[in-house]
Each structure stands twice: as structure tokens, then as C-alpha cells.
Amino acid sequence: MKKCKGCGIELQHKEREGVGYVADMNQDYCQRCFRLLHYGDTTHFKTNYVTNEKIIRIFQKYSNELFVLIIDVLDVFCLKDDDLLEMFKDYNVLLLINKTDILPENVSDVKINKILTRILFDLNKKYPNIKAAVMTNKYERAFNDQFYLILSEMKAKRVVFCGWANAGKSSLINKLLHSDSLTASMYPGTTLEEIQIDYKDYQFIDTPGLVDVNNYATYLNLEKYRLSKIDRTIKPQVFQLNDPQSYFYDGLLRVDVIPEEKSSITFYINNQNKIHRTRYDHADDYYQQHYCEFVLRIKPLGISEYDIDGKQMFIIKGLGMFKVNGKCRIRVHSLNKVRIFESEVDI
Ligand SMILES: Nc1nc2c(ncn2[C@@H]2O[C@H](COP(=O)(O)OP(=O)(O)OP(=O)(O)O)[C@@H](O)[C@H]2O)c(=O)[nH]1
Ligand SMILES: [Mg+2]
């Protein structure tokens, strides 16, 4: 049985529109990987080929090996309340925090290190199976050296790379191998099956990304996904307020802030999108009038209320985060199916 080197799917040359299709069985990459890499073709966006049950069965085969759990840095801030670590509680885990470059420029390496060390310290109390944690960084060579050192200290030869879809698993393995053999793309669900790669003394296993029901991306169509995904350094959008105000992230998210004293709210979202502010008593009208014009919109939005006294960060996976500072009541209108995570982290 021959498998695609990019996504792991079994190759076939009978069904032209089916997964794994190749015109010629001598080819190493399926048509989907080829088109994705060379033409940015997205016909296969969200094929729903991968299910979490299927991925968990792959993990069970390797239960004695080291699991490198790759996590998008924004997801780390809500990791303690998320479902992810529960899935790995019986395995030896090395946490790998990825995409730190998307944090705002004012967040220094020292600051982020401090925040993450604190988070990981707390996590370790509940999950002693987390053996170590490491961050990717700009200096690829330094990161690779550090990574291989940890593997040698842990005496790990077979390593399973896992995590939520689109966390950067395949890109990371490519970096470690100094190659681009695995298909990586901005769309979740790129890797379709496990892929074993032998490298020096090691065997690396890439796996498909787990589907996250608490992530907006799971429910957005291609256009909205592209426009809302954060892939660059975030430029925070800050607002000060004395009177009740409502803040709209198009039709994806609305936050009403009713202050008792001077307060502020800061959004960390895709820089292309601007937060629109309006008076709280005018917000319902604004939403009704503009709903059809919003490029980014989704329904149904539910409302959650919080009382803030001090600083509080809220993480809406797939969209970003916002921080509220002051004494106020807030009402968050967000996609019903997606959980809102609260975090003490202050960046
Ligand atoms: N900003 C930033 N983007 C990254 C980084 N690492 C990976 N990416 C991007 O993240 C996206 C997903 O990368 P993949 O390697 O395909 O992710 P994956 O986890 O293998 O995805 P699935 O196979 O779908 O589960 C791509 O657009 C990468 O360019 C990083 O360190 N910083
Ligand atoms: Mg992948």
C-alpha cells in the first residue's frame, strides 16, 4: 500500500475526485496535496475526513512513546480549562508552545517566558505526565538543538507529534528535518493520516489535527476563516470608556461594557479587521441595520455576563482574545457552541 508523503492518505488512481487520487501510482503526493501546495487550491477545505475517534486510535497504538503536544500560544492561556490535556493524561507529554511570534511586539521574550512558566507550573500539579515544555523561537537552529537535547535527555527515539488542527505540527517536523516533505497549509485538516518518518536515530510520527469544538474556525466557511485567522503579530486595539459602549467584531462577536468607573477594553484579533464601537443604547439597532453588510457574520450568538473588578482576559478560540480593565459589567455576545475561556494572564 503506497501512501502520500504529504498527508499520509493511501494513494489510489481510480476515483478522480476521491481522497488520495493520483494520475500515476509512481507519484509520491496525492492530487490534493499537489494542488494545495502549488496552486493554493482549497476545494477540499473541511472534507471532514478526520475524526477525533480516528486520531485517538492512532495515539493508543503509540501509548508508550513520547507525545510532543504542539499548542498555539493563544491556546496555552486557556489550557487549564480546555479539554485537550485530558486526552493525553495517560501519555508522557512534552508541551511545545508554537506561534509565539503572533503575540504583540510589546510582549518581550522575558515576559512571555515568565507567563508561560507560571501556567505550566500550575498545569503540572494536575497533569504530572507533562514532562517538560519548550517554546519555538525565531532562531530555528537554536530551537532544533534544544529540542534534540531534550529528546536525548528523555531517551526518546520514537516521537508522536499531536495537537489541535492547524497548530503547526507538520511545519515543525519539516523544520526539524530540514525538509519540506510534509504538506503544511493555513487550513485545518491538512494531514489526513499518521505519517512515519525515519530521521537519523529517530522515528517521528505526524498525526492529523484534533477537531476543536470550542474553536470558531470549526464553524466558519473558507472566506470567513481566511479573514479572521490570526497569522501575524497582533496589533492590539485599545478603547477607553466612561459610559456604556458596545464593541463589534463584525457579526462574529459583540462585547457590551457597562462601566462603574473609567475602564478599558483591548482586542487582540486579526489586524485586518477593525473593531467598531457604538453607544450601548444604540447597539441593537446597529446590529440589525448592519448585519447583512458584515462580511464576517455567524449565528446564533448567545450572551454571557461577567462582573469585572481589575483585569480579566477572555479567550475566544479561533478569533483571538480581549482584555477588560476596570470596574464594570460586560455582556459578551458570541457563537453559542463555542466556550468563552477566562484567564488571569496579563500581556
Ligand atoms: N505565525 C506562525 N505561523 C505558523 C508557525 N508554525 C506554523 N505556522 C502556520 O500554521 C499553519 C498550519 O501549519 P501546519 O504545519 O499545516 O499545521 P498542522 O498542525 O500540521 O495542521 P493539520 O495537519 O491541519 O492538523 C500554516 O499556515 C503555517 O505556516 C509559527 O511558528 N508562527
Ligand atoms: Mg499537519
Image: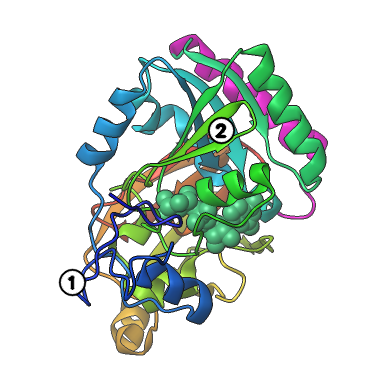
Q: Position of residue 207 (x, y in %)?
A: 40, 42
Contact between labelled residues 1 and 2, with CB atoms less than 8 Å apart: no
Q: Could you tell which of marks 2 and 1 lies nearer the N-terminus? A: 1
Residue 91 visible (yes or no): yes
Is residue 58 a member of the stretch shown in magenta? no
Q: Which residues are magenta?
A: 104-126
Q: Is residue 162 above or below residue 48?
A: above
Residue position for label 1: 14
Q: Position of residue 276 (x, y in %)?
A: 52, 76
Is residue 107 a member of the stretch shown in magenta? yes
The residue positioned 33% from the left and 79% from the top of the image is 287
Q: Nearer the viewer, residue 61 or 113?
A: 61
Q: Nearer the viewer, residue 13 or 325?
A: 13
Q: Is residue 149 above or below residue 51?
A: above
The residue positioned 55% from the left and 56% from the top of the image is 181
Amino acid at the residue labelled 1: Lys
Q: The residue tagged with tag 2: helix, strand or loop?
A: loop
Q: Nearer the viewer, residue 108 or 255?
A: 108
Q: The residue tagged with tag 1: helix, strand or loop?
A: loop
Amino acid at the residue labelled 2: Glu
Q: Residues within 10 Å of mark 2 (few under 14, many from 20)?
A: few
Quarter of image, res 143: top right
Q: Residues within 10 Å of mark 1 (few under 14, many from 20)?
A: few
Q: Nearer the viewer, residue 11 or 274?
A: 11
Residue position for label 2: 344
Q: Position of residue 206 (x, y in %)?
A: 45, 41
The residue positioned 77% from the left and 45% from the top of the image is 140
